[in-house]
Image (cartoon, rainbow, N blue to C red):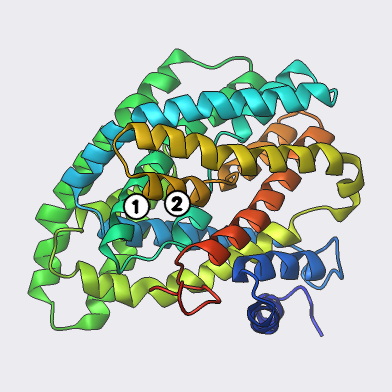
Amino acid sequence: MDTSSVGFTIFIVFTGAAVFATAALYARQSLLMAYILLGMLFGPWGLGWVGDPNLVREIAEFGIMFLLFLLGLNLQPQDLLYMVRKTTLVTLLSSVVFFMVGFAVALVFGTTLMESVLIGGAVTFSSTIIGLKLLPTSILHHQHTGEVIISILLLQDLLAIVLLLIVQGSSSGGLLLFDLLKLLGALPALALLAWLGERYLLLPLIQRFDRIQEYIFLMAIGWCLGMAELGQLMGLSAEIGAFIAGVTLASSPIALFIAESLKPLRDFFLVLFFFSLGAGFDLGMMTSVLLPALLLAVALLLLKPLVFRLLLHRTGESLRRSHEIGYRLGQMSEFSLLLAVLAQERQVIGTEASYLIQLATLLTFLASSYLIVMRFPTPIAVSDRLRRD
């Protein structure tokens, strides 16, 4: 049996996911937790049946893009701009608080000043996948909740990109001011290009051949991936490009059809993504960073819901909605993992600091997804009372 083949990897991931998901539902646990534990078991640091988690992760990145593309389809551009303006102060103030907590915890456990700064930066972001994958979209209350969450996550993504630029610049001799200025202009430029492409190219083609559903499906995927690639070329991220691609189509009559058509494809890649998170973690490093990672994770799981609740309530959101959003954003981010890996590869931080970030991220993923599934409406809730599409 060739355990290095793509076919065997797909077999392990999805057959194992079916088994683990069944066990998780009987045990009233989150499915996301099941996928991460599956990756730990069969990855190179477990049984070793999947030897290259990076390959799986590269494939799985498409899941994040499709997730944000579909979310963009449910957001009108004018509503998004209003929410971004409303949540800018919330995002900045919360980021400062979380940075200080991460920085202080890291210093207490003997990391260097640079490592403490990067750990503080890594904890400021929340997970796009957990925040939005577990959010129902069929209820008006949660459509507005989604608008608030995605506006905060979008601003956090921009902050994360700036931090990644700083890491890259510090390892190559310095960060050029031109890079940051280019970043500030890239987002509106990308939005303008997306609007022009949607209005004068994409919609005319779809309207001409709208009876052929396969063509619409292919055009939607091409549009999503094309804008994602353009976002990367402009110095942003593929996720931001995919999200803007969805927002530009939100007011079109085919948005609902596209959203329903791409959901199975999104879920396929997201299973791979969470499997890759578990498979990519070196279990041998756990003992050396377990205590600081556990302390950091607990501090964030307690503090993030509280800080977001207080700040959002001050912007006029109801206390109930602010409370719920705080819990849905109460974890670290995929960007935290990317920052940890990149900083270690560039020798900006050491191995232990990198794995501290990675383990704290995984711990917050597991705990946060469990809390959300148990307490709030989600598409994968184990309680009929909380299950929503």
Mark identifier at residue 59: none
Residue 137 pos. (x, y %): 33, 65
Residue 172 pos. (x, y %): 64, 21
Residue 131 pos. (x, y %): 48, 53
| Residue at numbered disc 2 | 324
Residue 219 vertical position relative to residue 23 in the rendered view, above or below: above
Structural crowding at the residue carrying mark 2, measured as other residues with C-alpha within 10 Å and reported as few (<14), some (14–19) or many (≥20): many
- Image quadrant occupied by the C terminus: bottom left
Q: To which quarter of the image does residue 387 belong? A: bottom left
Q: To which quarter of the image does residue 116 belong? A: top right
Residue 371 vertical position relative to residue 192 in the rendered view, above or below: below
Rendered residue at 56%/39% (across/down): 304
| Residue at numbered disc 1 | 145
| Residue type beneath disc 2 | Glu
Q: Which dot, 1 or 2, sits closer to the camera?
A: 2
Contact, CB < 8 Å: mark 1 with mark 2?
A: yes
Q: Between residue 337 and residue 186, name the one nearer to us.
A: 337
Q: Tell which circle, 1 or 2, labels the residue nearer the N-terminal end.
A: 1
Question: Position of 226 compared to 355: left or right?
Answer: left
SS at mark 2?
helix
Residue 374 vertical position relative to residue 184 in the rendered view, above or below: below
Residue lying at the far front of the rendered structure? 319
| Residue type beneath disc 1 | Thr
Q: Residue 76: tell me if it is visible.
A: yes
